Image (tube, rainbow, N blue to C red):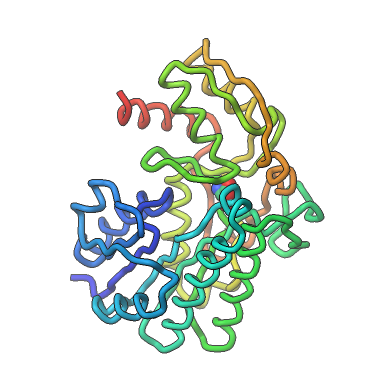
Amino acid sequence: MSKDKIWVIGASGQIGSDLVVELRKIYGGANVIASDIKEPNQEIKEGGPFEAFDVCSVDEVSHIVKKYQITEVYNLAALLSGTAEKDPRFAWRLNMNGLFNILNVAKEGLVKKIFWPSSIAVFGPTTPKFDTPQVTITEPNTVYGITKIAGERWCEWFFHKYGVDVRSIRYPGLIGYKALPGGGTTDYAVDIFYHAIKGMDYECFLSKDTMLPMMYMPDGIRATLDLMHAPSSSIKIRSSYNIAGMSFDPQMIHESIQRHYPEFNVNYKGDFRQEIANSWPSSIDDSEAYKDWGWKPGYDLTSMVDDMIIQLKHKLL
Ligand code: AKB
């Protein structure tokens, strides 16, 4: 029986829906507590404990930590880039207060390890665009990016000041089939599959040549678990690690999907998210993650598209 009690905050979201299932395979259903303010899917509801919960409330955080004797927290609750731009005050409250509450509980010694997701959104228009290094200019010009760079600074500060074992990854755009993403700039790369499989045209909100760093969800989950399972002494970066999967633009993913659906058509009509995407890197240098905890992606564009179509067809049809 595992002694670890894992708490996943944001379990109904895009990463949470996949991560909870994987964690329950490792630690057992009863040892992984899922929580969200949104209803979870059936698989999460039936696989172990679920708590409806608001991460912004300090009292609720310590109540759950004590109730389940939590040892590890994955705090995934956040507004993504598109939504955050429309509601900066709420984005700051959710993205910052949630993290701050968890870091403070860990400082008291109850929680032993924390995972917190950062993003390529910490980079901005002044950052080198290709092979963006681990340490470089981070001047984000989006609300979401500002919360992520501030969060990274807090993580590092709590580690140095109080020895809080907090670990983080700068996720690229994640592509998964379990849950729909909500409010992100990279979400087009998920939506596009639903349209292709349903035989509908897709209107893309980014231009055809907007190249962004992306990752298939199984790689994203593996990176998260590898980082969390690595010995503390190998984690040299306590702000957040760059990780890379693949880089593509909307035209490239369209063409790759056309291998399966030759008639599939995409129209391009940029919206406010184009500007956000323009401020982000096109590709990422993840050599520090490789050096410290052995990170290597498993999927490229072709293998991701092939698997995504199999999985989504199974889910939708
Ligand atoms: C978004 O598009 O906002 C996210 C991200 C890159 O962090 N997927």
Above or below for 258 versus 105: above
Above or below for 181 versus 292: above
- Residue furthest toward the right? 126
Quarter residue 186 falls in: top right
Quarter residue 277 falls in: top right
Q: Position of residue 15 (x, y in %)?
A: 43, 51
- Residue furthest toward the top? 263
Q: How many marks?
A: 0
Quarter residue 188 falls in: top right
Above or below for 260 versus 123: above
The residue drawn where x is 54% and y is 62% is 90
The residue drawn where x is 38% and y is 67% is 54
Of residues 138 and 218, the one nearer the viewer is: 138
The residue drawn where x is 78% and y is 62% is 137
Q: Position of residue 233 (x, y in %)?
A: 51, 77
Q: Position of residue 162 (x, y in %)?
A: 52, 88
Q: Quadrant of the N terminus?
A: bottom left
Q: Quadrant of the C terminus?
A: top left
Determine whether, in the image, residue 273 is placed left or right of residue 258: right
Residue 123 visible somewhere in the drawing: yes
Of residues 171 and 33, the one nearer the viewer is: 33
Residue 243 visible somewhere in the drawing: no
Q: Position of residue 60 (x, y in %)?
A: 34, 75
